[in-house]
Image (cartoon, rainbow, N blue to C red):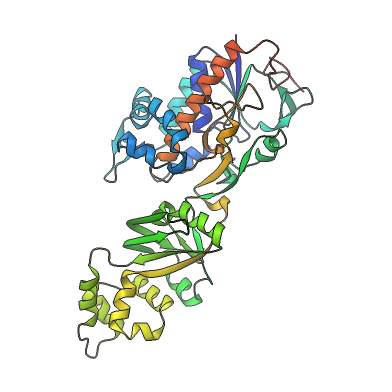
């Protein structure tokens, strides 16, 4: 029987294993952690966002400049196919008010259990606490395990090792130097869907009072030095050092890249997106008598709490005392950022194996028989189910291509390993 190894037991790796098993290949999955799908489970604690219900064209547009590479995966296995796949596992899905798709029970564990049960039933074998750390001198995959070193072989290998976010769950980017040593072209891993530090930091007063509190019903606008723009309504959260949350995550790629080019990035915050600039000006200029500014803005515009705190934090007293300038600032308040938070804190990561190093089946051109999938590839996606869908779709592509390779492998081609027996000792 033809054999394959999958390194990484996250969604991309599991989908690659599924595709290989369906093609009749004997599959062994290896992972350095104690159990499969650890990041998948943690992401599902608040309700697993599987995918999004929007049309495929709009869905594919969320991948920005990587759309040409990602869209073919999605056309073969996109949001519709993912929901059908979940249904086959006995897990019904629902569409939330935002268009996001969740398991009806809002839990990740039942879906993962059903998936692993099906994979084991199809002959997939799992080897946990096996951390891949490169190759042996004869080209075998080398693993560190609780029982010692192992050298393991197969006709094809799929790497699905994740990026560098949430390293405590296994995705620590430790694979990067291993592939760099083999001459593989890799873009540096960096944070995506991440928070940022504000320039100069918050004052102690603001941080102590408002860290952890949300800015609700706001909008942000930003334009980078290349002319790329972002504008959206939503909400985000103040942190002890800056900002994070869904609206900031949505703009994070633009903001992160601008900081990389210019050393700083600024977004403009509209505290009252439901009101026109004229309406805000009229309300701010309304006579307030003996009332304080805070009482006046709370009464006329419902500006209070963290929104009022931010005005005091960022605006000079002279601006606060001028109704016209204050109204303008409330619709266009500049917030300058000095840096992204570390990648270990990010929801996901950008960068990875560049597509010019891969063929259409996600096989490394420089290492025939070795395929890559998931977040370790050089693409990124916003939150909303996009990342998970594309990870699984890429795993399917890599798994199918690896199955074809294992059958039609050219005579004398390297195995990227040393033995056909997955249980062979080093």
Identify the residue at image location x=21%, y=77%. Answer: 283
Identify the residue at image location x=33%, y=34%. Answer: 56
**Placement of 136 over or under 388, stated as above or below:** above
Residue furthest bottom in the image: 290
**Placement of 397 over or under 287, stated as above or below:** above
Q: Is residue 105 visible?
A: no
Residue furthest right in the image: 137
Identify the residue at image location x=59%, y=14%. Answer: 406
Residue 20: % across, % down: 52, 18
Answer with left or right where residue 385 lies relative to residue 343: left
Residue 137: % across, % down: 79, 26
**Image quarter for residue 152?**
top right
Residue 48: % across, % down: 39, 40
**Image quarter for residue 393?**
top left
Quadrant placement of the N terminus: top right
Answer with left or right where residue 409 lies relative to residue 388: right
Answer with left or right where residue 176 lies relative to residue 280: right
Closer-to-camera residue (1/363): 363
Residue 73: % across, % down: 44, 29
Q: How many marks?
A: 0
Quadrant placement of the C terminus: top right
Q: Is residue 393 visible?
A: yes
Closer-to-camera residue (80/74): 74
């Amino acid at each position: 029987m033809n054999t394959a190894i999958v390194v990484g037991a996250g969604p991309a790796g599991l989908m690659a294993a599924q595709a290989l098993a369906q093609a009749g290949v004997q599959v062994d999955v290896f992972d350095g952690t104690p159990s499969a799908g650890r990041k998948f489970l943690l992401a599902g604690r608040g309700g697993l966002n599987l995918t999004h219900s929007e049309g495929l064209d709009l869905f594919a547009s969320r991948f920005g400049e990587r759309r040409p590479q990602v869209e073919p995966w999605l056309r073969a296995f996109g949001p519709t196919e993912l929901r059908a796949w979940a249904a086959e596992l006995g897990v019904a899905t629902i569409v939330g008010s935002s268009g996001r798709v969740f398991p009806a029970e809002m839990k990740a564990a039942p879906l993962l259990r059903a998936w692993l049960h099906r994979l084991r039933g199809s002959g997939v074998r799992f080897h946990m606490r096996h951390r891949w750390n490169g190759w042996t001198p004869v080209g075998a995959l080398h693993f560190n395990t609780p029982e010692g070193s192992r050298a393991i072989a197969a006709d094809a290998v799929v790497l699905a090792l994740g990026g560098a976010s949430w390293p405590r769950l296994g995705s620590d980017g430790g694979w990067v130097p291993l592939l760099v040593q083999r001459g593989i072209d890799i873009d540096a891993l960096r944070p995506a869907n991440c928070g940022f530090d504000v320039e100069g930091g918050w004052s102690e007063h603001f941080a102590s009072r408002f860290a952890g509190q949300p800015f609700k019903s706001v909008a942000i606008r930003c334009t980078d030095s290349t002319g790329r723009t972002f504008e959206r309504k939503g909400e985000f959260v103040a942190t002890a050092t800056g900002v994070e949350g869904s609206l900031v995550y949505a703009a994070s790629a633009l903001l992160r890249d601008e900081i990389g080019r210019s050393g700083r990035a600024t977004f403009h915050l509209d505290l009252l997106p439901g009101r026109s600039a004229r309406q805000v000006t009229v309300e701010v200029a309304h006579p307030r008598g003996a009332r304080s500014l805070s009482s006046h803005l709370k009464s006329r515009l419902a500006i209070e709490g963290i929104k009022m705190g931010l005005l005091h934090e960022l605006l000079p007293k002279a601006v606060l005392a001028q109704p016209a300038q204050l109204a303008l600032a409330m619709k266009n308040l500049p917030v300058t950022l000095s840096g992204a938070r570390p990648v270990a804190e990010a929801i996901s990561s950008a960068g990875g194996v560049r597509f010019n190093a891969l063929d259409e089946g996600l096989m490394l051109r420089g290492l025939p028989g070795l395929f890559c999938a998931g977040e370790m590839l050089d693409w990124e996606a916003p939150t909303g189910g996009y990342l998970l869908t594309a990870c699984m779709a890429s795993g399917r592509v890599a798994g199918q291509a690896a199955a074809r390779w294992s059958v039609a492998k050219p005579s004398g081609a390297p195995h990227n390993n040393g033995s056909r027996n997955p249980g062979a000792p080093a």
